[in-house]
Image: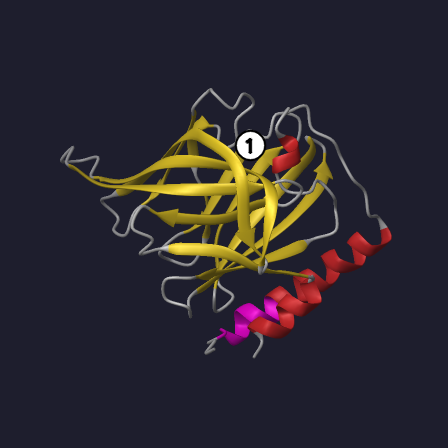
Amino acid sequence: MKRKAVYIGVCFLVLGLAVVAYKSLTSAKTYSSKNPNAAYFYPLDTVPKVYLYRDMAGGLEEEFHRIYTVEDNEGPHLIVEVYASDGRLREAINYNIDSLSVQDHMVVNRFQEKEKATLYKNTLFPMALQTPTWFASKFSGVTDSTVFLFEIQRQFQQKKEAHFLEKEHDEALYFQDLVRLTAINPFTKKEQAKLDTRTSVFAKNIGLVAWYTADKSVHYRLEQILSQEEWIQIISR
Protein backbone atom coordinates (compact mmCIF):
# COMPACT_ATOMS: atom_id res chain seq x y z
CA MET A 1 0.00 0.00 0.00
CA LYS A 2 1.47 3.31 -1.13
CA ARG A 3 1.08 6.37 1.09
CA LYS A 4 2.43 9.82 0.31
CA ALA A 5 2.57 11.92 3.47
CA VAL A 6 3.19 15.65 3.40
CA TYR A 7 6.17 16.25 5.72
CA ILE A 8 5.08 19.54 7.23
CA GLY A 9 1.53 18.31 7.73
CA VAL A 10 2.70 15.16 9.45
CA CYS A 11 5.00 17.08 11.78
CA PHE A 12 2.13 19.37 12.74
CA LEU A 13 -0.13 16.40 13.33
CA VAL A 14 2.43 14.57 15.43
CA LEU A 15 2.93 17.58 17.68
CA GLY A 16 -0.77 18.30 18.02
CA LEU A 17 -1.79 14.71 18.54
CA ALA A 18 0.91 14.16 21.14
CA VAL A 19 -0.54 16.97 23.26
CA VAL A 20 -4.08 15.66 22.88
CA ALA A 21 -2.97 12.11 23.61
CA TYR A 22 -1.32 13.19 26.85
CA LYS A 23 -4.41 15.09 27.96
CA SER A 24 -6.63 12.16 27.03
CA LEU A 25 -4.61 9.67 29.05
CA THR A 26 -4.71 11.89 32.12
CA SER A 27 -8.36 12.96 31.89
CA ALA A 28 -10.34 10.16 30.26
CA LYS A 29 -14.07 10.71 30.64
CA THR A 30 -17.28 9.33 29.16
CA TYR A 31 -20.55 11.11 28.41
CA SER A 32 -24.15 10.19 27.72
CA SER A 33 -26.58 11.55 25.13
CA LYS A 34 -30.32 12.19 25.26
CA ASN A 35 -30.67 10.87 21.72
CA PRO A 36 -32.52 7.51 21.96
CA ASN A 37 -30.38 6.11 19.13
CA ALA A 38 -27.05 7.10 20.70
CA ALA A 39 -26.04 3.44 21.12
CA TYR A 40 -25.50 3.37 17.33
CA PHE A 41 -23.41 6.52 17.32
CA TYR A 42 -19.70 6.85 18.08
CA PRO A 43 -18.45 6.16 21.63
CA LEU A 44 -18.73 9.36 23.67
CA ASP A 45 -15.40 9.39 25.47
CA THR A 46 -12.35 11.62 25.49
CA VAL A 47 -9.84 8.99 24.37
CA PRO A 48 -9.36 9.61 20.63
CA LYS A 49 -9.84 6.74 18.21
CA VAL A 50 -8.99 6.63 14.53
CA TYR A 51 -11.23 4.60 12.20
CA LEU A 52 -9.54 3.30 9.05
CA TYR A 53 -11.99 2.81 6.18
CA ARG A 54 -10.96 1.07 2.96
CA ASP A 55 -12.67 1.38 -0.42
CA MET A 56 -13.58 -2.24 -1.08
CA ALA A 57 -14.24 -1.46 -4.76
CA GLY A 58 -10.69 -0.31 -5.47
CA GLY A 59 -8.82 -1.83 -2.57
CA LEU A 60 -6.12 0.84 -2.24
CA GLU A 61 -7.96 4.04 -1.36
CA GLU A 62 -8.32 4.74 2.36
CA GLU A 63 -10.00 7.33 4.56
CA PHE A 64 -9.32 8.03 8.24
CA HIS A 65 -11.83 9.44 10.75
CA ARG A 66 -10.38 10.71 14.01
CA ILE A 67 -13.09 10.68 16.68
CA TYR A 68 -12.96 12.22 20.14
CA THR A 69 -15.05 14.12 22.68
CA VAL A 70 -14.01 17.44 24.18
CA GLU A 71 -15.59 19.81 26.66
CA ASP A 72 -15.34 23.61 26.59
CA ASN A 73 -17.43 26.61 27.59
CA GLU A 74 -20.19 25.42 25.26
CA GLY A 75 -20.31 22.03 26.94
CA PRO A 76 -19.26 18.57 25.72
CA HIS A 77 -19.28 17.80 22.01
CA LEU A 78 -17.96 15.06 19.75
CA ILE A 79 -15.70 15.82 16.80
CA VAL A 80 -15.18 13.68 13.70
CA GLU A 81 -12.15 14.76 11.67
CA VAL A 82 -11.87 13.32 8.15
CA TYR A 83 -8.41 12.71 6.67
CA ALA A 84 -7.30 11.53 3.25
CA SER A 85 -5.05 8.49 2.91
CA ASP A 86 -1.92 10.70 2.91
CA GLY A 87 -2.84 12.31 6.24
CA ARG A 88 -4.31 15.57 4.88
CA LEU A 89 -7.21 16.96 6.88
CA ARG A 90 -10.28 17.48 4.66
CA GLU A 91 -13.12 18.39 7.02
CA ALA A 92 -14.38 18.15 10.60
CA ILE A 93 -17.93 17.80 11.93
CA ASN A 94 -18.75 18.88 15.47
CA TYR A 95 -21.74 17.12 17.08
CA ASN A 96 -23.71 18.35 20.08
CA ILE A 97 -23.68 15.56 22.69
CA ASP A 98 -27.27 15.93 23.92
CA SER A 99 -29.09 15.67 20.59
CA LEU A 100 -26.22 14.54 18.30
CA SER A 101 -27.15 17.38 15.94
CA VAL A 102 -24.34 19.14 14.08
CA GLN A 103 -22.96 22.16 15.90
CA ASP A 104 -20.23 23.19 13.44
CA HIS A 105 -18.83 22.09 10.08
CA MET A 106 -15.27 22.92 9.06
CA VAL A 107 -13.78 22.29 5.61
CA VAL A 108 -10.28 22.71 4.21
CA ASN A 109 -10.68 25.03 1.21
CA ARG A 110 -8.72 25.30 -2.03
CA PHE A 111 -6.04 27.37 -0.28
CA GLN A 112 -5.54 24.53 2.25
CA GLU A 113 -6.98 26.76 4.95
CA LYS A 114 -9.57 25.77 7.55
CA GLU A 115 -12.91 27.39 6.78
CA LYS A 116 -16.00 27.42 8.98
CA ALA A 117 -18.97 26.53 6.81
CA THR A 118 -22.42 28.11 7.06
CA LEU A 119 -24.99 25.62 8.37
CA TYR A 120 -28.54 25.78 7.00
CA LYS A 121 -29.69 22.33 8.21
CA ASN A 122 -27.92 20.60 11.09
CA THR A 123 -29.17 17.04 11.41
CA LEU A 124 -27.18 14.01 10.25
CA PHE A 125 -28.10 11.45 12.91
CA PRO A 126 -31.80 11.03 13.80
CA MET A 127 -33.54 11.45 17.16
CA ALA A 128 -36.44 9.36 15.78
CA LEU A 129 -35.64 6.67 13.22
CA GLN A 130 -38.73 7.30 11.10
CA THR A 131 -38.04 11.04 10.85
CA PRO A 132 -35.78 11.95 7.88
CA THR A 133 -32.74 14.11 8.61
CA TRP A 134 -31.37 16.99 6.55
CA PHE A 135 -27.86 18.41 6.62
CA ALA A 136 -26.98 21.45 4.50
CA SER A 137 -23.68 23.33 4.59
CA LYS A 138 -22.28 26.13 2.40
CA PHE A 139 -18.59 26.89 1.87
CA SER A 140 -16.28 28.39 -0.75
CA GLY A 141 -15.93 26.69 -4.14
CA VAL A 142 -13.02 25.96 -6.43
CA THR A 143 -12.93 29.56 -7.75
CA ASP A 144 -13.51 32.99 -6.24
CA SER A 145 -16.84 33.28 -8.05
CA THR A 146 -18.43 30.04 -6.78
CA VAL A 147 -19.61 28.49 -3.55
CA PHE A 148 -20.64 24.93 -2.75
CA LEU A 149 -23.87 23.86 -1.08
CA PHE A 150 -23.44 20.35 0.31
CA GLU A 151 -26.55 18.44 1.41
CA ILE A 152 -27.32 15.02 2.83
CA GLN A 153 -30.94 13.92 3.23
CA ARG A 154 -31.08 10.69 5.20
CA GLN A 155 -33.92 8.18 5.60
CA PHE A 156 -33.92 5.09 7.84
CA GLN A 157 -34.24 1.80 5.93
CA GLN A 158 -33.84 -1.16 8.26
CA LYS A 159 -32.04 -2.71 11.19
CA LYS A 160 -29.97 -5.84 10.52
CA GLU A 161 -26.49 -7.31 10.91
CA ALA A 162 -23.44 -5.78 9.23
CA HIS A 163 -20.07 -7.15 8.14
CA PHE A 164 -16.96 -5.20 9.16
CA LEU A 165 -13.68 -5.74 11.02
CA GLU A 166 -13.57 -9.12 9.26
CA LYS A 167 -16.66 -10.55 10.95
CA GLU A 168 -20.45 -10.26 11.20
CA HIS A 169 -21.93 -7.94 13.82
CA ASP A 170 -25.51 -7.68 15.02
CA GLU A 171 -27.51 -4.51 15.55
CA ALA A 172 -26.75 -2.08 12.74
CA LEU A 173 -28.90 0.73 11.37
CA TYR A 174 -29.08 1.15 7.58
CA PHE A 175 -29.90 4.55 6.08
CA GLN A 176 -30.42 5.71 2.52
CA ASP A 177 -28.71 9.02 1.80
CA LEU A 178 -29.45 11.45 -0.99
CA VAL A 179 -26.22 13.42 -1.42
CA ARG A 180 -26.25 16.65 -3.38
CA LEU A 181 -23.30 18.97 -4.13
CA THR A 182 -24.35 22.18 -5.85
CA ALA A 183 -21.87 24.66 -7.31
CA ILE A 184 -23.43 28.13 -7.20
CA ASN A 185 -22.27 31.31 -8.89
CA PRO A 186 -23.79 34.10 -6.76
CA PHE A 187 -23.16 36.70 -9.48
CA THR A 188 -24.75 34.92 -12.46
CA LYS A 189 -27.17 32.87 -10.32
CA LYS A 190 -26.18 29.76 -12.25
CA GLU A 191 -26.21 26.42 -10.43
CA GLN A 192 -24.80 23.02 -11.27
CA ALA A 193 -25.75 20.08 -9.07
CA LYS A 194 -24.36 16.58 -8.73
CA LEU A 195 -26.66 14.00 -7.15
CA ASP A 196 -25.83 10.61 -5.72
CA THR A 197 -27.49 8.02 -3.51
CA ARG A 198 -25.72 5.83 -1.03
CA THR A 199 -26.30 3.59 1.96
CA SER A 200 -24.75 4.47 5.32
CA VAL A 201 -24.45 1.84 8.06
CA PHE A 202 -24.14 2.61 11.79
CA ALA A 203 -23.32 -0.31 14.11
CA LYS A 204 -24.08 -0.53 17.80
CA ASN A 205 -21.33 0.81 20.09
CA ILE A 206 -19.15 1.81 17.12
CA GLY A 207 -20.89 4.32 14.83
CA LEU A 208 -20.37 4.59 11.07
CA VAL A 209 -18.97 1.30 9.76
CA ALA A 210 -19.70 1.50 6.02
CA TRP A 211 -21.07 3.60 3.18
CA TYR A 212 -21.59 2.60 -0.44
CA THR A 213 -23.35 3.56 -3.66
CA ALA A 214 -26.13 1.45 -5.17
CA ASP A 215 -23.80 -0.23 -7.67
CA LYS A 216 -21.00 -0.38 -5.06
CA SER A 217 -18.59 1.38 -7.39
CA VAL A 218 -17.76 3.22 -4.15
CA HIS A 219 -17.81 1.02 -1.06
CA TYR A 220 -15.96 2.08 2.08
CA ARG A 221 -15.94 -0.27 5.05
CA LEU A 222 -14.37 -0.04 8.50
CA GLU A 223 -11.22 -2.14 8.49
CA GLN A 224 -9.38 -1.13 11.69
CA ILE A 225 -9.82 0.96 14.83
CA LEU A 226 -6.48 2.53 15.67
CA SER A 227 -4.96 4.41 18.56
CA GLN A 228 -3.44 7.80 17.77
CA GLU A 229 0.05 6.37 18.07
CA GLU A 230 -0.71 3.61 15.56
CA TRP A 231 -2.25 6.10 13.15
CA ILE A 232 0.76 8.45 13.30
CA GLN A 233 3.03 5.54 12.44
CA ILE A 234 0.89 4.67 9.41
CA ILE A 235 0.69 8.14 7.87
CA SER A 236 4.37 8.80 8.53
CA ARG A 237 5.53 5.94 6.34
Query: Which residue matches tag 1?
Result: 103
Residue occupying image coordinates x 59% and y 58%: 165
Q: Is residue 130 visible?
A: yes
Tell me the chief SS of the magenta region: helix
Mark 1, secondary structure of its residue: strand
Residue at the spot 36% in from the left edge and 66% down from the top edge? 58
115 relative to 22, above or below = above
Where residue 97 appears, x then y in whole percent?
Answer: 66, 31
Seen in the picture, residue 13 relative to 24 is either above or below; the reply is below
Measured as percent of width and height from the top left, residue 140 is found at 33, 44
- The image shows residue 152 at horizontal and vertical percentages of 38, 35
- Give the quarter of the image for residue 218: bottom left
Q: Is residue 77 left or right of residue 131?
A: right
User: Is 48 displayed left or right of 164 in the figure?
Assistant: right
Above or below, 40 against 60 in this view is above
- In the foreground, 63 or 200: 200
Side of 111 where 170 appears, left or right: right
Q: Is residue 151 visible?
A: no
- Which residue is found at the position 61% from the left and 28% from the top? 37
When the figure is inspected, residue 42 is found, relative to residue 114, above or below; the finding is: above
Residue 198: % across, % down: 36, 43
The quarter in which the C terminus is drawn is: bottom right
Q: Is residue 11 magenta?
A: yes
The span picked out in magenta is 5-12
Q: Nearer the viewer, residue 22 or 51?
A: 51
